[in-house]
Image (cartoon, grey):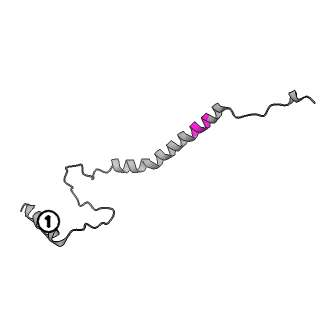
């Protein structure tokens, strides 16, 4: 038998490898974009979010609870200052 009649083992070409990697990267970006899109759309369509310097038309409630730790004297002084600042 002649060894020259055997076909050489097929190797994956570097170009094919690069294209496969490129398609995987593109697919990853598309999937990431699709998952990020709903939050971007909901933020863009929510006109009730006030801009910096605007006065909120409704109460704004934080999505999480947190404590503001102040000593009672400074808290009372701040509350009185706010009450005095409100026009009648």
Which span is picked out in magenta?
18-23
Q: Report the residue at 12% width, 67% height from top.
A: 77
Is residue 55 part of the magenta span, yes or no?
no
* Quarter containing the N terminus: top right
Answer left or right for 73 relative to 31.
left
Q: Residues within 10 Å of mark 1 (few under 14, many from 20)?
A: few
Answer left or right for 88 relative to 42.
left
Q: Report the residue at 63% width, 31% height from top.
A: 15
Residue 42 position within the rendered picture, expressed as x and y whole percent measured from the top left:
37, 51
Answer left or right for 39 relative to 55.
right
Q: Single out the residue that lies furthest toward the left.
A: 88
Q: Single out the residue that lies furthest toward the bottom.
A: 72
The correct choice, above or below, for 49 with respect to 5 in the image is below
* Quarter containing the C terminus: bottom left
Residue 28 position within the rendered picture, expressed as x and y whole percent measured from the top left:
53, 44
Is residue 21 part of the magenta span, yes or no?
yes
Tell me the residue that label 1 is attached to. Answer: 78
Q: Quadrant of residue 74?
A: bottom left
Q: Mostly what secondary structure, the magenta segment?
A: helix
Q: Report the residue at 82% width, 31% height from top.
A: 7
């Amino acid at each position: 038998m002649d060894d020259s009649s055997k076909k050489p083992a097929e190797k994956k070409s570097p170009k094919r490898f690069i294209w496969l990697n490129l398609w995987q990267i593109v697919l990853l970006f598309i999937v990431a974009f699709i998952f990020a899109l709903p939050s971007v759309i909901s933020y863009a369509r929510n006109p009730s979010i006030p801009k910096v310097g605007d006065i909120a038309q409704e109460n704004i409630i934080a999505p999480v609870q947190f404590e503001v730790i102040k000593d009672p004297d400074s808290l009372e002084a701040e509350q009185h200052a706010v009450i005095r600042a409100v026009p009648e």
